[in-house]
Image (cartoon, rainbow, N blue to C red):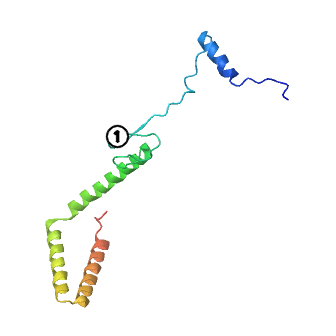
Amino acid sequence: MSTRYIHIGHEAEKRQVLSEMGLVEEDKESETKILPKVCLHCQTVNPCTNDICDVCLFSLEPQRYEEFVNRKRAVEQLLEKGKKVLTPEIEASLRNRVKTISALASIEREDLIEQYLEMLLSGFVKNFLSDKTVE
């Protein structure tokens, strides 16, 4: 049998009485509110337990969302550089090469297609390695 009486919640009652008397301020920091997460991409309010948005499937973590945005910008910049490099002359040349390969395929000359592609590839590699302006 216990020789000592322990009152559970004694400290909580004591704080309540003291705060009602104005002697102690209530500790508002101890109350943690669980707030919903707002998607940075589509502004949808999601439950606090979600890691990705229910609507757009983007990450709800600001750091991961920022990483995605930075990667997207980098890809867009590469595409813009590619558009500048692909001149109408180069595009016409590529179309002619595709027509040549299609013609060889229509007459079922896979050996010539293979030789033609090897020739094109070696030419592209030589041009790429000799071109100092490519970044």
Dot 1: within a 10 Å radius of its alpha carbon, few (fewer than 14), some, or many (20 or more) residues?
A: some
Quarter of the N terminus within the rendering: top right
Quarter of the C terminus within the rendering: bottom left
As helix, strand or loop, the secondary structure at mark 1 comes to: loop
Determine the image quadrant of residue 37: top left
**Which residue corresponds to the image point at 15% horizontal and 79% vertical from the top-left?**
99
Residue 22 at x, y percent in the picture = 59, 10
Determine the image quadrant of residue 124: bottom left
Query: Label 1: which residue?
Result: 44
Q: Please indicate whether residue 79 sits to the left or right of residue 27 in the image.
A: left
**Which residue corresponds to the image point at 41% horizontal and 44% vertical from the top-left?**
60
Total numbered labels placed on residues in the image: 1
In the foreground, 104 or 9? 9
Q: Amino acid at mark 1?
A: Thr
Determine the image quadrant of residue 7: top right
**Which residue corresponds to the image point at 27% horizontal and 86% vertical from the top-left?**
114
- Residue located farthest toward the top when viewing the structure as drawn: 21
In the foreground, 92 or 131? 92
Q: Is residue 59 above or below residue 101?
A: above
**Which residue corresponds to the image point at 33% horizontal and 44% vertical from the top-left?**
41
In the foreground, 18 or 100? 18
Residue 16 at x, y percent in the picture = 62, 16
In the foreground, 71 or 125? 71
Q: Is residue 132 above or below residue 122?
A: above
Q: Please indicate whether residue 41 sits to the left or right of residue 23 in the image.
A: left
Q: Is residue 45 above or below residue 21?
A: below
Residue 73 at x, y percent in the picture = 32, 51
